[in-house]
Image (cartoon, rainbow, N blue to C red):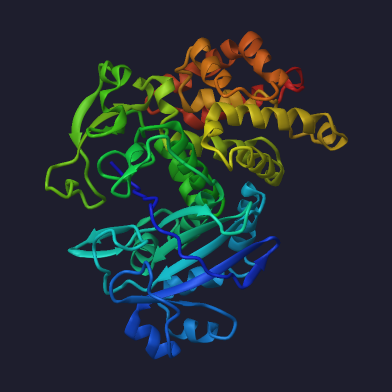
Amino acid sequence: MKQIKQFLASCCLLLALGWLPASAQTITFYYVAPTASITAAFGSADGSGQMPAGYSFKIITAANAATFLSVAPNRVKYVYNQLQPGTALRTQVDRVFNNSGRLVDVQYYLANDITGVAPGETDMFSKKIRDGRTYVWPAANGTVSDTPGRYTGWVMLGEFFLEEGVRKRDGGILSINEVILHETSHTQWVGHWTKWGAIDGHAITYGADGSHSAVELLGDQEAAINEGLGNFYGFTLNSVAIDSMYHEFTDAGHRYFVEGRSVLAGDALLNAVPSRREARLVDDSGRVVRYPDGRELVVFVFPWRDIPGTRLLFAESSSTAFYTMYWQHAYANRDTAFSFIGHSAHSMFNGRMKRFLTYSCNRLALKIEAYNATAAGQADASKTSSMFPFALLDLVTHFGMTDAEYKADYDRHYPDANPRAYNEYFTNHRAAVRALVAGDIGASPVRFTDALNRIKTYMQQPITIF
C-alpha cells in the first residue's frame, strides 16, 4: 500500500518581524543550520530558541540573501527562489493567503538538516527517522499574533525530505511545490484544528502514531478536510499527483485503513464491515512500521466501496478529490472554480465548527447560484449546476449515505442560507444521478472518471442550472 505520511507539528511560536510585504501580510524566511555553519557564513546567528540542539537560525534579508544562496543546499534554495514574487508558486501561495483574508503572517523555516538533527520533541520541528538518523519532516502550524486580529503561521521544511520527495514522490521536483502549498494552506486556518487535542505533541485524531495518510480514516472530519484541502492546493501545481489520485480511485481492493490504536478503531459501523481485514502498516520500502516501543503498527483495511459513506468523510482523500474535481470540471476557466473554493475555505478559516464537506457543498452551491444570476454567469456556457458539489460528494463516498444521513450531516452545521440546489438535489435529482453511475462505481476496476464525466454532463443540462 502506497503511503504518504505527513505531520502537523504542535510547537511553540518564535516571533519575528517580516521583511517581504504581501499586501497586509508578511513573509519571513529563516535559514536553519548547524550553529558553526551559520556563524561561518554570516558572521553571527539571529538566535537558537526552539531550534534542534546545535542548530541556530538566520533571518534571510535582501542584505544577506546572496550569502544564503551560496551556502544553502539545493532544495532549500529552490524553496526560497520559488517563493519570490512573480513565480507560479508564489502566485498560487498568494491566492491561498486569501483563505484567511490575508490575516496570517507566515514564517518559512528552511533547514539544512542533511547531517541529521537531534531527536526528541524539545524544539519546534516535526521529525522522522531514516536509517537511524533524524530529519525535519514537512509540517506547519499557527497561533494568534501579538497584534490584535492577526495571526502567525509557520512552515518547516528540511533538505533531506525535500530531496527524498523529488526522488520518490509523484511529479519529482513538482512535489516540492505541492508540499509548500499544502503546508501553507494549513497556516491559513487558525484556531483549534481538531476536536481531540494532542498528547505529547501528537494529534489524537491521527492515532497513536501521530501520523496520517490520504487513505487513513482519521478521528474527526475537521482534520480530514484540512489535510485534503491542502492536498488540493498542492495538486494545482502537480498534475502528475492528480493523475495518480484518479488512478487510485479505480482500485477496488483493500486500500483504506484505520489504525488499531485510534479514535475510529472501535467504531461499530466499521467493525461490522464483512470485508474488514487486519494487516500491518508498511512504509514505502515495504518494512513494517513500528511504534517507538517496538510494537508493530496494526491496521484494519477496507475496500473503498465497503466503507459506510459517512465514514469516508473522515478520509482526507475524499476532500482532496472533491476539491480537485470541482476545480477541474465546474467551469472552463479554472480560476472561477478556484475562487469559489477559496470563498468556501474563507468561511471556515477561524473556527473548526464549519470545517466539513457538507458545509462546503452549501458554500459552493450558494456561490454558484449567485454567479449564475450575474451577466457573466449567464454568458458562461461552461457552467455547471449548483447541485454539482452535492453530486461530487456523493461520488467520493460512492453514494454510500442515505438521504437522511447526508442531510443530517449538512443540517447540523446550521448554514445561514440554503441554496435552491439543496432541495432540488434530494427531491428531484439524486436518485437519477445515482442510477446513472451505479455501473461505474460497481465495476472492478472502478470506472471513477467515467462516473465523474457522466455527472458533469448531467449537471450541465439547462434543466439543472439555477
Query: In screen coordinates, is 361 left or right of 401?
Result: right
In the foreground, 8 or 12:
12
- Position in image of residue 52 (x %, y %): 31, 69
In the foreground, 58 or 308:
58
The quarter holding residue 86 reads bottom right
How many numbered marks, from 0 up? 0
Query: In screen coordinates, is 92 left or right of 314?
Result: right
Q: Residue furthest right?
A: 375
Q: In this picture, is 358 found above or below 160?
A: above
- Position in image of residue 42 (x %, y %): 45, 88
Q: In this picture, is 310 found above or below 105?
A: above
* Image point (38%, 22%), residue name: 305
Quadrant where the C terminus is found in the figure? top right
* Image point (56%, 32%), residue name: 354
Q: In this picture, is 9 found above or below 429?
A: below
* Image point (71%, 42%), residue name: 336
Mark yes or no: residue 308 visible: yes
Q: In this picture, is 416 found above or below 203?
A: above
Mark yes or no: residue 254 visible: no
Q: Residue furthest left?
A: 294
Quadrant where the N terminus is found in the figure? top left
Query: In screen coordinates, is 45 left or right of 259?
Result: right
